[in-house]
Image (spheres, rainbow, N blue to C red):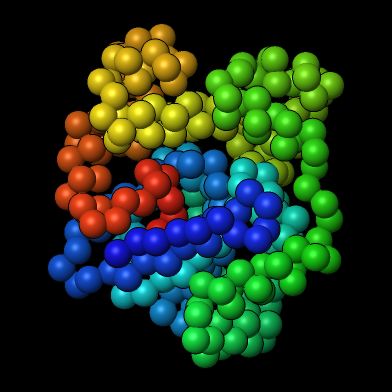
């Protein structure tokens, strides 16, 4: 069962998931986000994905904090491009002693998700403030705006935006725009909107365009995804791109 709530950290989400042994493992789809995850006693960082991620050894219990696009690097102390398409132990970023101490702190808490959130809030309090220009870029792209329009509104040149995007998002702004567009389409189709209409409303040229993007970014089809979504989350729905397994 999957549950989530808004975090006290702006734009972030706190989530938990308990995985039954017989539960089918679903791929985690790209969503533009990064997560700090507690997984049966370990602290892991899920970097930004450019393709679907299929957990090899899922564990029974998870808690996580999912950062908004571009928000995690300052808190974690690593550029997003270093973590692209990777799941790494927090020890690689913060050192083995600190990671072990923090993992034990979360493991021993009555509410592990709340303890993980407190850890993130403490870390964020001493971290550099998120780049307001990149926040504006994310907002523009999330709303369906073009990369060019987002760059112009932020007052950034193409090369400057690309360089800053690699550090913040893990990839260039065009890739982020594609991922956010796909997430808009998936939200629509899971709500029952017909594929062609979902494609149009999400900003794709047509249904065939959406189908190609789905295949390129996730390795599956809309029908295959929707079937798995309904069967895996018949009780509690999880967002399509959530990093609910490490």
- The residue shown at (62%, 75%) is 91
Q: Position of residue 76 (x, y in %)?
A: 69, 62
Q: Position of residue 238 (x, y in %)?
A: 36, 51
On screen, 120 above or below 66? below
- The residue shown at (65%, 25%) is 140
Asked whether the viewer can see residue 25, the reply is yes
Left or right? Give the position of 214 relative to 146: left
Q: Quadrant of the N terminus?
A: bottom left
Quadrant in which residue 225 is drawn: top left
- The residue shown at (19%, 59%) is 24
On screen, 60 above or below 224? below
Q: Quadrant of the C terminus?
A: bottom left
Quadrant in which residue 20 is drawn: bottom left
Quadrant in which residue 16 is drawn: bottom left
Asked whether the viewer can see residue 245, the reply is no
- The residue shown at (62%, 43%) is 69
Left or right? Give the position of 71 relative to 108: right
On screen, 34 above or below 169? below
Q: Position of residue 219 (x, y in %)?
A: 30, 36
Left or right? Give the position of 234 relative to 45: left
Q: How many numbered marks have been drawn onto this rendered protein structure? A: 0
Q: Position of residue 141 (x, y in %)?
A: 61, 26
């Amino acid at each position: 069962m999957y549950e989530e709530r808004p975090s006290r950290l702006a734009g972030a989400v706190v989530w938990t998931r308990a995985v039954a042994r017989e539960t089918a493992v679903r791929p985690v789809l790209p969503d533009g986000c990064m997560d700090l995850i507690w997984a049966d006693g370990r602290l892991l960082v899920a970097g930004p994905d450019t393709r679907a991620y299929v957990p090899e050894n899922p564990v029974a219990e998870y808690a996580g904090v999912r950062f908004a696009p571009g928000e995690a690097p300052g808190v974690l102390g690593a550029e997003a491009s270093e973590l692209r398409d990777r799941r790494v132990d927090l020890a690689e970023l913060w050192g083995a002693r600190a990671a072990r101490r923090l993992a034990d702190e979360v493991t021993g808490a009555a509410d592990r998700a709340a303890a993980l959130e407190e850890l993130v809030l403490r870390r964020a309090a001493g971290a550099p403030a998120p780049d307001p220009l990149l926040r504006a870029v994310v907002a523009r792209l999330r709303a369906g705006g073009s990369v060019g329009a987002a760059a112009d509104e932020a007052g950034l040149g193409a090369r400057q935006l690309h360089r800053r995007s690699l550090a913040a998002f893990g990839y260039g702004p065009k890739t982020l725009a594609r991922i956010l567009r796909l997430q808009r389409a998936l939200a629509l189709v899971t709500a029952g909107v017909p594929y062609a209409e979902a494609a149009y409303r999400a900003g794709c040229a047509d249904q065939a365009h959406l189908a190609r993007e789905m295949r390129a970014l996730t390795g599956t089809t809309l029908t295959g995804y929707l079937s798995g979504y309904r069967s895996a989350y018949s009780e509690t729905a999880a967002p399509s791109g959530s990093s609910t397994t490490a």
